[in-house]
Amino acid sequence: MLPIKPVEGANVNRRTFARTRSPRTILSMDNELKRLREQIDRADAKLLDALSERMKVVDKIAEHKEENEGAVQDEKREGEILSARIASGRNRNLEGEMVRDIFETILDFSKRRQKRS
């Protein structure tokens, strides 16, 4: 009987896949997956650091606006930010819709934070 080889991109369970690969190959693939997941964890940590830094600046902006009686929301500025971030994201091979959703959420939380200050 010929071994069953998984079709690229197919959803194959580990037991079926194991019939076509040696234990060493499976272990190597598990190590590679672990390494890739660690890369994701490091990238996520960088994202969180950047968000934390951004919120510190948001706090400073809130103080400035409070001292100078500025409005929390600036729709023109928000539009400029979204347009610039979407373009910047596209230059980095990111989908515009994803970038828009992320930055709309960030802007929403930034406004809420400024209102609390």
Image: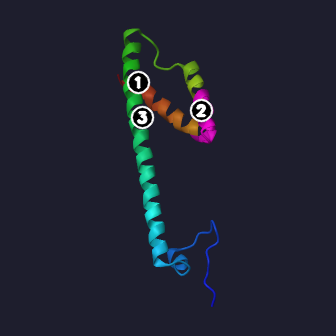
Name the disc covering residue 66, or none.
none
Q: Which mark is residue 58?
A: 1
Magenta span: predominant SS is helix
Residue 69 is inside the magenta segment: no
Tag in front: 1 or 2: 2
- Mark drawn on residue 51: 3
Q: Mark 2 = which residue? A: 88
Split into 4 quadrants, where in the image is the N terminus? bottom right
Name which residue lies at 45% across and 50% down: 40
Q: Secondary structure at mark 2?
A: helix
The quadrant in which residue 112 appears is top left
Q: Verify CB contact (< 8 Å) between mark 3 and mark 1.
A: no
Q: Amino acid at mark 3?
A: Leu
Do residues under tags 1 and 2 come within 8 Å of each other at their CB atoms?
no
Q: Amino acid at mark 2?
A: Ser
Q: CA distance from mark 2 to mark 3?
A: 17 Å
Mark 2 neighbour class, 10 Å CA radius: few under 14, some 14 to 19, many 20 or more: some
Whether residue 37 sits left or right of residue 93 in the image: it is left
Q: Where does residue 21 sit, x and y in percent of width and height?
A: 53, 77
Residue 4 percent coordinates (x, y): 61, 81
Task: Give, as a three-letter code, the residue at label 1.
Answer: Val
Q: Please provide the residue range marked out in magenta.
A: 83-98
